[in-house]
Image (cartoon, rainbow, N blue to C red):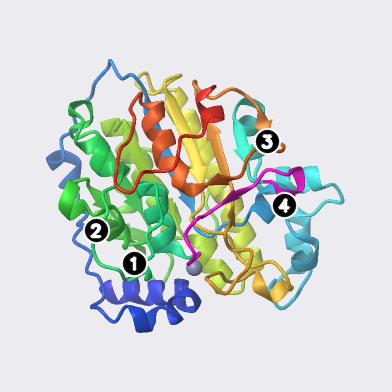
Amino acid sequence: MAYLVRMKINVLCFACMCFVMAASAGPKPKNPAKTSPAWLDTYSVQSDSTHAGNVILVTLDGFRWQELFGGAQRNLVGFKKFVSDVKSLKAAYWSKSKQERREKLMPFMWGTVANTGQIYGNRKAHSRMFVSNKYRFSYPGYSEIFCGFADKRINSNSYPDNPNKNIFDFLAAQPAFANNIAAISTWNAFTHIINSNRNGVPVYTNLLSSADTAAYTSNFAFQQFTTTIPVSNGFITDDTLTYHFAKEYISKFHPRFAFIGMDETDHFGHAKRYDAYLHTANLEDAYLADLWNMLQQDSVYANNTTLIITCDHGRGKIPRYRWQSHGVKYPYANETWMAVIGPQTPAIGEVHGGAKLYHNQIAQTIAALFGYTYTNSPSPGPAINAVLGK
Ligand SMILES: [Zn+2]
């Protein structure tokens, strides 16, 4: 299993890791998180019916704004080098209308979120969001989101425990958040990015699929979950289990702040499989819809929970061979997006124009949703006031 984890990471971000290898010759990170049936009972979270609010942060690794806002791209959807069955892919996601294309790809995003939330990052509508770190790959990207600033020392996906404190540390230090935070992810580097060794936040990452695509965790069979997932397909395996685990955890323990790290959009980008990349986005949109529905049917979360959805970096875009990867040498891979839906967030829908936004503003925005001012050194980026209705 550990071999599979290492192999996956190497495949996932081989391109972006190449140029940082020289700068990060340290040992490969070990994953301290363990998942077993026991966690459900041993990690006893205190449910608090007086929640002032909850935030669920979901990331779709390396998912581009081009597909979010434009759906299947004309110059890729029919390109046989990246698509095994052009006819069926076009039947699933193509339309002459850009509006229909994106609704086919992500119906939750362009239905519920667009109607009742906010979606930032459509360059064609002059809404711009960026990562501020120069590296444009995962560890620096997530570190920027969590910490609220970029750190040029964070230059490798194999970086050990993050030396910078982050929004998890900040919230974990608040009495109202004691045992009320969790992270569940496909990629096992999150234990280091969040630094659960320091702040004690549980990070569940040991979720894998076997070679025959039957998903499992260590000693924890798929069918033992009591929650159900809406759909699945033959492309996504690891993220399906991550979502299933996250939904089970959240519905049972009601953390006030939870992070769910999805990964397979990035994986299929590096694998040069545009069909699987689109199918992944489509399925993860269905998971987001299922998550939102679950939250609204839960007495602790209903009308009291903000869902933030974003990515950790963009990808290249011109020429078309650039879409598959990202990194410091990819000029457009710093272009990102963010969607927010929740009771404090006015229904603007797709945002047009506005100031440039950066991922270093997300941590402070999360703190502000809880009514806190997040302090750190260096200073985090400012909260995004429009999310807060200001
Ligand atoms: Zn990558």
Q: Are marks 4 and 1 in contact (CB under 8 Å)?
A: no
For the residues marked 1 and 2, what is the alpha-carbon distance in whole angstroms? 10 Å
Residue 153 lies, with reference to residue 185, above or below; the image says below
Q: Which residue is mark 3?
A: 351
Q: Main secondary structure of the magenta part?
A: loop
Q: Element under label 2? A: loop
Q: Amino acid at mark 1?
A: Arg
Q: Amino acid at mark 4?
A: Gly
Residue 381 lies, with reference to residue 273, above or below; the image says above
- Boundaries of the magenta span: 122-136
For the residues marked 3 and 2, what is the alpha-carbon distance in whole angstroms? 35 Å
Q: Which residue is mark 2?
A: 163
For the residues marked 4 and 3, what is the alpha-carbon distance in whole angstroms? 17 Å
The picture quadrant where one finds residue 306 is top left
Query: Of tags 3 and 1, which is closer to the observer?
Result: 1
- Give the percent coordinates (x, y) of residue 377: 29, 47
Mark 4 or mark 2: name the one nearer the start of the chain.
4
The picture quadrant where one finds residue 279 is bottom right
For the residues marked 3 and 1, what is the alpha-carbon distance in whole angstroms? 33 Å
What number is the disc on residue 153? 1
Residue 132 in the magenta stretch? The answer is yes
Query: Of tags 4 and 3, which is closer to the observer?
Result: 3
In the image shown, does 318 or 10 lie closer to the viewer?
318
